Image: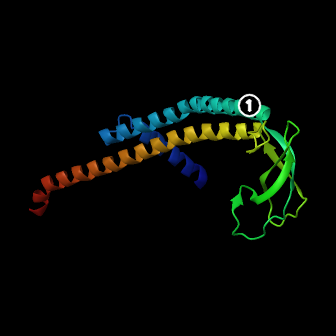
């Protein structure tokens, strides 16, 4: 047997004994509770997977509904800049760029003017793509199917990792209290036998 396989076997054996000490007379009640808690954590981690998948699916479905509503309520149009975009970094920011005056045609055919997001240094007459509502006012880009998938997966993973984190913190706290209890027990035992050792 190689050193690697022996080490793996030793680790597996130790893990099994930690979870289930069996009839080992050296196993204390804390060791048995430690094993039970580890089993409970593993069971809870596995049992949380379907709940996380369901939660992620619900979030995904909700985001798809938002995407459908946004697609019906927003329109992508082309805006023409009516001024040069500033190049100074001190100018107020809009997501994706800077504020620049522009004009565009609303879904109803009327012309609208306002400020849109453009990259620094864009010249007058440049065209940028913007999203507008039915009235022609600038609005945020609609939700997408890809975004819905990302949000659903993220929500499911967040739930599962949150449960694992809570379990890990709970187990760490249990181990800390168990270690303190063992030290206190050792102290009491030492106080009991110390006089005999001194004599």
Tell me residue 132's x, y (percent). Answer: 79, 42
Give neighbour class at mark 1: few <14, some 14-19, many 20+ (Cα, 10 Å): few
In the picture of the structure, the residue carrying the numbered disc 1 is: 69
Q: Quadrant of residue 24?
A: top left
Q: Quadrant of residue 53?
A: top right
Tell me residue 194's x, y (percent). Answer: 14, 58
Residue 94 in sight from this viewpoint: yes
Left/right placement of residue 169 relative to residue 146 reads left
Q: Residue at x 76, y 36 (%)?
A: 145
Left/right placement of residue 80 relative to residue 74 reads right
Tell me residue 96's x, y (percent). Answer: 75, 56
The structure's colour scheme is rainbow
Q: Residue at x 68, y 29 (%)?
A: 61
Circle 1: element type: helix
Residue 27 in sight from this viewpoint: no
188 and 69: which one is in front?
Answer: 69
Q: Quadrant of residue 73?
A: top right
Left/right placement of residue 194 relative to residue 168 reads left
Left/right placement of residue 169 relative to residue 23 reads right
30 and 122: which one is in front?
Answer: 122
Quadrant into which the C terminus falls: bottom left
Q: Residue at x 35, y 37 (%)?
A: 33
């Amino acid at each position: 047997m190689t050193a690697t396989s022996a080490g793996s076997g030793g680790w597996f054996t130790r893990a099994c004994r930690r979870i289930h000490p069996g009839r080992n007379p050296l196993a204390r009640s804390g060791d048995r509770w430690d094993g039970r808690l580890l089993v409970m954590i593993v069971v809870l981690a596995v049992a949380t997977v379907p709940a996380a998948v369901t939660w992620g699916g619900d979030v995904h479905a909700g985001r798809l509904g938002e995407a459908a509503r946004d697609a019906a309520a927003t329109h992508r149009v082309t805006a023409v800049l009516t001024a040069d975009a500033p190049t100074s970094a001190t100018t107020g920011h809009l997501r994706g760029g800077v504020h620049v005056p522009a004009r565009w045609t609303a879904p109803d055919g009327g012309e609208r003017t306002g400020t849109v997001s453009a990259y620094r240094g864009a010249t007058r007459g440049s065209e940028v793509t913007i999203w507008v509502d039915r009235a022609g006012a600038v609005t945020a880009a609609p939700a997408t199917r890809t975004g819905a998938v990302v949000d659903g997966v993220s929500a499911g993973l967040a739930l599962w990792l949150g449960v694992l984190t809570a379990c890990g913190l709970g187990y760490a706290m249990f181990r800390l209290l168990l270690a303190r209890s063992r030290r206190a027990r050792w102290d009491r035992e030492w106080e009991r036998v110390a006089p005999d050792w001194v004599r």
